[in-house]
Amino acid sequence: MSKTGPKHSGYRRLAMYWVDHLRQLFSSLGELWRTPLSSLMTIAVLGVSLALPASFYVLLKNAESVSQHWQSKAQISLYLQQGVTEQQLAGLKQGLSEMDELETVTYISPEQGLNEFREAAGFAQALSLLADNPLPAVFILNLSATGRQPQAAEALLQQLQAQPLVAEARLDMAWLARLSSIVELLRQVVVGLAVLLLVGVLLVVSNTLRLNILNSRREIEIMKLVGATDGFIQRPFLYVGLWYGIIGSMLAWWLTLVMVFWLSHKVSVLAALYNSDFRLFGLDWSESLLLLLTGTLLSLLASGFAVRRHIRAIEPG
């Protein structure tokens, strides 16, 4: 009996330790209900502060999706010299197919190009009077993800232009560079605003708990007089900060979801005008979980700093 007694006593102390934490966790939730107006205002500020960077992230994610869709249509038109032989064409096509910067290589013969031009332009009768086909052989090169970068596309264009069989190589670099710059600028703006708003979350939680501690100053002094440790006194305030983070993050997730739902129809109508089936993407499950964890951890960090600092400063008079 003497051997098992201490073991059971240790289990009991461990169980009571967690039971005490759970009791204080849910009693701290009751603290929020006892001050509903101030609690709701704090949670609302936290929710909006977290929803804004989440909404900016959704905007950036959709902008990158649109950018990738447009960049996937980036093509280099390779106009060949007149009189290129079949053997030279085969060798050039083989070399192009082996380039990592190219996704697909499509060959358009002079005869095929003339037929397409005849059907599209409506000049069939006039074109039939031509003695020779003036159109050159053309390779249409779709760029891969590696080749769509502005610097890589420019280097590839110069490399292809230097080929002896190539009369001219064309790629509209201006829109590709502008699109890449716009997305990069948007990315930097989102990061900057997110940092500012998350710092705002830290300040809101810290100030709210500071006021809670000052309002409970008398009770804290009495608890210290009867021998309560700082850790024991800090625990309820830390749990209040935890609840602020959890509920505020859930509100931010809901606000982001409402924003995406509200804009989805407008975006679909706009995409239809451009004959596109683009749909607005919201937060997926992993991103939603990251939002909840970020808000909760930031709130815990802010509450831990504020609670330790202000409770240690309170001493019984």
Image (tube, helix red, strand yellow):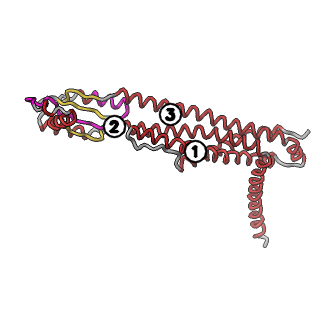
Q: Which span is picked out in magenta?
A: 129-158
Q: Secondary structure at mark 2?
A: loop
Q: Quadrant of residue 306?
A: top right
Mark whose residue sits in front, 3 or 1: 1
Residue 94: x and y in percent read 20, 40
Residue 269: x and y in percent read 45, 41
Q: Residue at x 7, y 29 (%)?
A: 131
Labels 2 and 3 touching (C-beta < 8 A)? no
Q: Residue furthest left?
A: 131
Residue that carries the numbered disc 1 in the rendered image = 258
Determine if the magenta segment contains residue 15.
no
Residue that carries the numbered disc 2 in the rendered image = 73
Labels 3 and 1 touching (C-beta < 8 A)? no
| Up/down of 72 relative to 159, above or below | below
Q: Quadrant of residue 111?
A: top left
Residue that carries the numbered disc 3 in the rendered image = 187
- Quarter that holds the N terminus: bottom right
C-alpha span from label 2 to label 3: 22 Å
Residue 237: x and y in percent read 77, 46
Camera-nearest residue between 8 and 247: 247
